[in-house]
Image (spheres, rainbow, N blue to C red):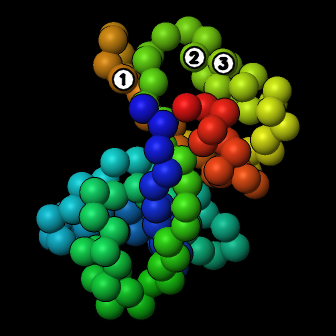
Amino acid sequence: MVEKVEQLIVSTEDRVGMLSELTQVITEANVNIEAITAYSWEGKAIFYLVTSDNAKVIPTLKDKEWQVEETEAIRIDLENEIGVLNQIGTKLKSAGVNLLYCYGSVSEGNSPCRLILKAEDNDKALIVLS
């Protein structure tokens, strides 16, 4: 399955325990995290998340005085098989779609994997990958 989603970009101070604090707020809002990546940059912790209900969790995140932005991305559910990600990369390259970033999850066995990506042209990427 390939579809557009709205991801959250949450910027907090970079200190011990921020992952715990962020996920506690989301858990207490009864919202599921479907995908996440995070990094530290210039004293900030930056979290990219896809959740089950952004609208429900955004006010709570903002109440913590964290910066919250909602942006469009593409979610791809794919098989956990050798070369699947290479096929996606090849399709995007062949169509001239510039990938800005991606993050994903993998699992063992035949469980599906999830990839979140953002391209310069998400509409074109969606067509190419569908």
**Cα distance in 3D space between marks 1 and 2:** 11 Å
Mark 3, other Cα within 10 Å: few <14 / some 14–19 / many ≥20: few
Q: Earlier in the sequence, mark 3 or mark 1?
A: 3
Residue, disc 3: 87
Amino acid type, residue under disc 2 in the picture: Val
Report the disc number at residue 36: none
How crowded pointer 1 is (Cα within 10 Å; few <14, some 14-19, many 20+) is rated as some
Relative horizontal placement of residue 125, taking residue 81 as reference (left or right): right
Residue 85 appears in which quarter of the rendering?
top right
Which residue is at 45% across, 84% downward?
66
State the CA–CA distance, disc 2 to disc 3.
5 Å
Say which element carries label 1. Answer: loop
Of the residues shown, which amino acid type is indicated by label 3? Answer: Gln
The x and y percentages for residue 14 are 53, 73
For the residues marked 3 and 1, what is the alpha-carbon distance in whole angstroms? 16 Å
Quadrant of the drawing holding the C terminus: top right
The label shown at residue 84 is: 2
- Residue 119 or residue 105, whichever sits in front: 119
Is residue 104 in view from this perspective?
A: no
Q: Are marks 2 and 3 in contact (CB under 8 Å)?
A: yes
